[in-house]
Image (spheres, rainbow, N blue to C red):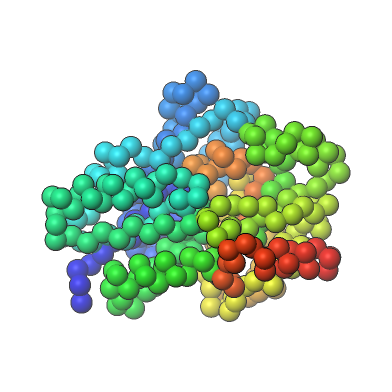
């Protein structure tokens, strides 16, 4: 049995204090920076903000769509966080925000090398989760359960590197105007999409990016297609702890949880606010469930076919 190791996260995950405590995830985490439009610091990203805080935050984000920037924590803080754990005589498993959307993973590798210069006997594993938000939370729970079974740091890191390609997102984004203002969707598409009630559905791709699968007309149809798509990908849902993440869509998140429970019967479902770090870029309007399923295909061939079938089936 090796030394005890801690599981560390960044604020790009969605894992509030109650879940971190339950799964023995290190309570401190690296906090990304959110900037005002004038480049002054607005806040440090907080995984523990309340529903009321979220309403205020996404109001600020929507008002300043495309003008709010984010960055991961400064190098000095990453080093300090890693060093704090190894000083306690423990090793580290850090589950990083996807390299497909952030430079955090590269920065953590540099921080690791610096810390190991002073603590050569320590072990630090940095895993690029290729996920964000609830996807990281799903992997963190798995890592915690594997550690509880007695698996070593290296064994857990290897397994997480393998199963990260099985974590999916079935989600709906209903605020197209924000995506247009933030430059993530052309303004004409957003305008006409809003007029006719089109909503894009997304999933995570092989590179760790949140990528649109296609669009569905109508809110109710979008929700139906979301779960038809999920039904074609999910595996052994009864054994899973699933995470539903939303950005200022409390009622819809509860509806998603009810549908997931009735249709897929997971072991547990937890609803979380989308992290402030990711929320600055995604904006209000996201509701998504994160779960394990079929392995992600590099060209998304299976996923796109599943979406097409799901859409045709509604």
Locate the N terminus by quadrant. bottom left
Question: Does residue 197 appear left or right of residue 6 in this picture?
Answer: right
Question: How many numbered marks appear?
Answer: 0
Locate the C terminus by quadrant. bottom right
Q: Quadrant of residue 179?
A: top right
Q: Is residue 245 above or below residue 188?
A: below
The residue most toward the right is 196
Residue at (49%, 42%) from the top-left corner? 277
Residue at (65%, 34%) from the top-left corner? 183
Q: Is residue 52 above or below residue 253?
A: above
Measured from the top left, where is residue 189 in percent x and y? 78, 39
Measured from the top left, where is residue 92 in percent x and y? 27, 59
Q: Quadrant of residue 220?
A: bottom right
Can the viewer see residue 264?
yes
Q: Nearer the viewer, residue 44 or 252?
A: 44
Question: Does residue 276 appear left or right of residue 78 in this picture?
Answer: right
Residue at (43%, 27%) from the top-left corner? 41
Can the viewer see residue 194?
no
Q: Is residue 5 above or below residue 247?
A: below
Measured from the top left, where is residue 10 in percent x and y? 40, 49
Q: Quadrant of residue 57?
A: top right
Q: Nearer the viewer, residue 62 or 256?
A: 62
Residue at (63%, 34%) from the top-left corner? 182
């Amino acid at each position: 049995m090796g030394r005890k190791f801690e599981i560390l996260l960044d604020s790009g995950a969605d894992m509030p204090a109650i879940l971190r405590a339950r799964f023995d995830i290190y309570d401190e985490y690296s906090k990304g920076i959110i900037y005002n439009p004038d480049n002054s610091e607005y806040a440090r990203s907080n995984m523990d903000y309340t529903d009321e805080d979220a309403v205020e935050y996404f109001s600020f984000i929507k008002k300043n769509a495309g003008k709010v920037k984010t960055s991961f924590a400064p190098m000095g803080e990453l080093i300090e966080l890693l060093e704090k754990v190894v000083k306690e005589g423990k090793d580290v498993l850090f589950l990083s925000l996807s390299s497909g959307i952030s430079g955090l993973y590269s920065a953590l590798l540099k921080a690791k090398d610096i810390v190991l210069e002073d603590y050569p006997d320590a072990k630090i594993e940095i895993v690029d989760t290729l996920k964000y938000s609830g996807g990281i939370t799903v992997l963190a729970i798995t890592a915690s359960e594997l550690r509880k079974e007695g698996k070593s740091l290296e064994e857990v890191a290897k397994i997480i590197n393998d199963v990260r390609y099985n974590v999916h997102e079935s989600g709906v984004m209903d605020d197209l105007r924000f995506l247009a203002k933030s430059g993530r969707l052309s303004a004409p598409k957003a305008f006409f999409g809003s007029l006719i009630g089109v909503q894009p559905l997304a999933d995570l791709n092989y590179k760790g990016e949140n990528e649109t699968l296609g669009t569905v007309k109508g809110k109710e149809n979008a929700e139906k297609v979301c779960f038809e798509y999920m039904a074609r990908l999910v595996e052994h849902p009864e054994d899973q702890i699933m995470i539903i993440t939303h950005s200022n869509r409390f009622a819809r998140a509860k509806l998603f949880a009810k549908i997931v429970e009735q249709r897929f019967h997971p072991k547990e479902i937890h609803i979380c606010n989308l992290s402030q770090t990711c929320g600055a870029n995604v904006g209000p309007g996201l509701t998504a469930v994160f779960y394990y399923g079929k392995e992600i295909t590099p060209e998304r061939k299976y996923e796109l076919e599943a979406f097409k079938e799901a859409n045709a089936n509604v």
